[in-house]
Amino acid sequence: MQQGFLTPGAETDHTLVVVFLRGGADGLNMVVPVEDDEYYRQRGRIGIGQGDTARLDDLFGFNPALASLLPAYHDGDLVVIHQAGSEDRTRSHFEAQDFMEHGGHVMGGWLARYLRTAYRQAGPLSAIALAKTQPEVLRGAPASVVMESFDTFDFGASAPGFFDALSSLYGAERNDLGEAGRDMLNAMRKLETLREADYRPEHDVRYPTDDFAHGLRQTAQLIRAEVGVRAVSLDLNGWDSHFAEGPLITPLMRRLADGLDAFQRDLGPEMAHVTVVVMSEFGRRVYENASLGTDHGRGGVMFVLGGGVRGGRVIHDWPGLSPEHLEGPGDLPVVFNYRNVLASILRRHGGVDDLKPVFPGPALSPVDLYGEDGTREASLEGGGRAA
Amino acid sequence: MKPSRRSFLLWAGGFSALALSGCPPVNLAGVLPPSRPGEALGAPPTGEKIDPVSHALNRLTFGPTPGAHARVSRMGVEAFLEEQLSPETIDDTWCQYQVRRLETLHLPAGELFEYKADFLQKELSQGKLIRAVYSRRQLQEVMADFWGDHFNIDMSKGDCPWLKVADDRDIIRRHALGSFPAMLRASALSPAMLWYLDGRSNRKNNAEAVPNENYARELLELHTLGVDGGYSQRDVMEVARCLTGWYVRSEEMMNKGRVEFRAEWHDDGPKQVLGHAIPAGQGRKDLDRVLDIVALHPMTARHLAMKLCRYFISDTPPEQAIGTVTGAFLNHGGAIRPTLRALFHTDAFRQSAGQRFKRPFRYLASALRATAAETRGEGGLPDYLQRMGHAPYQYPTPDGYPVEETPWLGTLLWRWHFAVALARNTVPGVHVDWAALHAGLGGETGLMTHFLGRQPNGDERTAIAASGLVPAALLASPAFQRY
């Protein structure tokens, strides 16, 4: 489908899954700097004990609630980027989310611009938001389908004659409109055969039952159905942990990790053609507050899973958390701009060499996610250290 | 109304109980829309190809209503063109009565700040739909659509949610068939535009201050000369300098949204724009000087002619038509009516019947007009526009929604969805009297020629008749996606 409209170089079958952790996820309690004493000094009550974490390298350990991501990490399919975030310093959820979804001080979403740049003509199902409303990241997309579940697309059964009529009407059109109509009908025929209840994940994987895992399960089903899905947007909400952080975000971390674990085991080798990127609008303040929580901060974590990343490492340039290394009221500074993480992915899989149309604004310096020569050096020059 | 799961379910369930829990059909309380099914409609078109009457109705309006073909056939295409070019002579009381219910559309800019942004957006979009469907001043509406994209403003930026309401009324609609130079000046000083393209923060308030070029660039690139219009980066910077000091009040409760010129923020040195010297010390008059230079510039004429020809003729209009329209614009000092009159008389226009692809807004409006639907432009309609990526006043970048076919080809799914829902009367807040329409048009054959603007060919007739859902198949057909 749509091959005639691909920009040369774009992979015809890659799917980018963008997971947004809304509310400002606490990177420091997710990927814990267990060898940094300052962390324990400033988080005397809510810090994650060194012995409780699962070690990732000589500095960091996973929060135990993220344990199900360990196999992916150790198999080299998952890379963690610490001190990640944007240059937005408002510490406002609304501003920072918009900024991150827009890809800078521009209007419309970066994912929408990416689709317009990489795929000259969008297929009917090229962009899917598993949500109630269209997320900002897809604003301005040539076409996007916003849905909570595709089970509600009960096409043929309700009006079989109608679709036969469309097949013959669009079949007779020898032009772009006819082709678009035929593509749409093909996609719908494929969707029609998809019933969530009928889906059998591979390798006996059992997805959890929460909404996030449900979204990932549908994503996997759509990818397997080969209906031309190029971008999926998924949210996992509720990370705004000002109060009683542990009980609040522990279940969210489990949901995130268990869902992604099921997704990547289900897709198996297919993950070479799928990239999942996890991001949040900002991280949290280093020191804990009086309510056993943390306030809005700056640097957080990003995860990139699949698509051939050189995983099993935490990309960071750790300054230590003592106050002189912090920014503003006591926040971890951002070293890895989220655009430089995304740029690395888009360049690898989108066939987009010139990313200016996707990310207008400051020049990009892609973070080396793939262990490629050149870009790795570039990221080192940019101050990053690949641990 | 946010897109909801319900509108998906309607597809599956036919006319389900869920539909009934949505907005009820509108009670029009004895006031009839301009054309109603069941009245004596006259014959629908009968030709094998789209005839000049149907063509004029397609392009000068948001689509033929039942009976329109007979009416325009009686009066003649020429008279219809002239009628539409003089909207002030057309009685539009019924539509105005419908729009009057949307109170925010009539308030002075200052009072709009009392309302929530979402509500203003809803009423403004509702007003656009109601007018597109019911106004008799159709060319006026079509041109408001054209200029709304040309001077695009996204309602999500800064104070734009409040200020765009006034911009749409006082700039876009007021000047839609008036004079381009007057509209350009009004737009340059529109509070919404000053917000949207950062004119309000373009100031020289100290020696180091660098002008904000945003509006200056779009003024030249999009509003006037066009990207190949022969201006340089230096011209952009000089225009930005000329426009320093124009400001919109935003913080104060009093006079919020008022535009004023702050001389102390104006760069009053000498400037040079497109080869014209602008002497120092002219203050606010710099703005008029810049607009004088660009409003009737030959490249502006060509750029606008190109855009008008794309909008009214085809994605790739022939050079001859562009030349004719450019000439008319210049010969009439940028007056929009004679410019359009010239366009409508080009061979290219006459020969382009059925070649344009409907954008989603036009698709919905034309379906509602063709079916003489009852609607207040709310309920399920904003959902459909959102899903098809064509919600009014929400295009993020200043170039406005695209006019070409390609970017919209991915929207067929929701068009078909809408076709079925309209045929089954399950679009919340919309009602079609299908039985009356069927009877008024003389049965299935009349229904087909009415929707297609011509007789269906053999294959079309067979496929549509066998669909089991003739109105939906017509509305979803390739032919109905074009105009």
Image: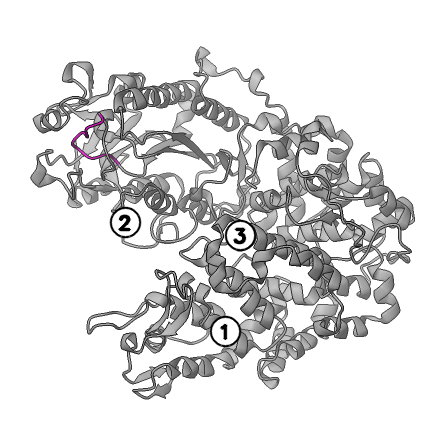
Please determine whether, in this image, residue A71 is positioned above or below residue B44. Answer: above
| Element assignment for label 2 | loop
**Residue A364: mark:** 2
B35 within the magenta span: no
Q: Earlier in the sequence, mark 1 or mark 3?
A: 3
Q: Pointer 3: what residue?
A: B121
Depth order, front residue of A262/B252 = B252
Q: Pointer 1: what residue?
A: B186
Q: Are marks 2 and 1 on the same chain?
A: no
Please determine whether, in this image, residue A84 is positioned above or below residue B448. Answer: above
A284 within the magenta span: yes
Query: What residue sits 90% from the left and 58% below the top?
Result: B42
Disc 3 residue type (three-letter): Gln
Depth order, front residue of B392/A177 = B392
Q: What's drawn in magenta, residue-wise?
A: A283-291
Disc 1 residue type (three-letter): Ala
Query: What residue sits 92% from the left and 49% below the top?
Result: B442
Tag 2: Cα neighbours inside 10 Å, few (<14), some, or many (≥20)? some
| Element assignment for label 3 | helix
The quadrant where residue A9 appears? top left
| Whole-percent x, y for residue A216 in the image | 45, 25
Q: Of helix, strand and loop, which mostly describes the magenta segment?
A: loop
- Of the residues tagged 2 and 1, which is closer to the observer? 1
Disc 2 residue type (three-letter): Leu
**Residue B412 seen by the camera:** yes
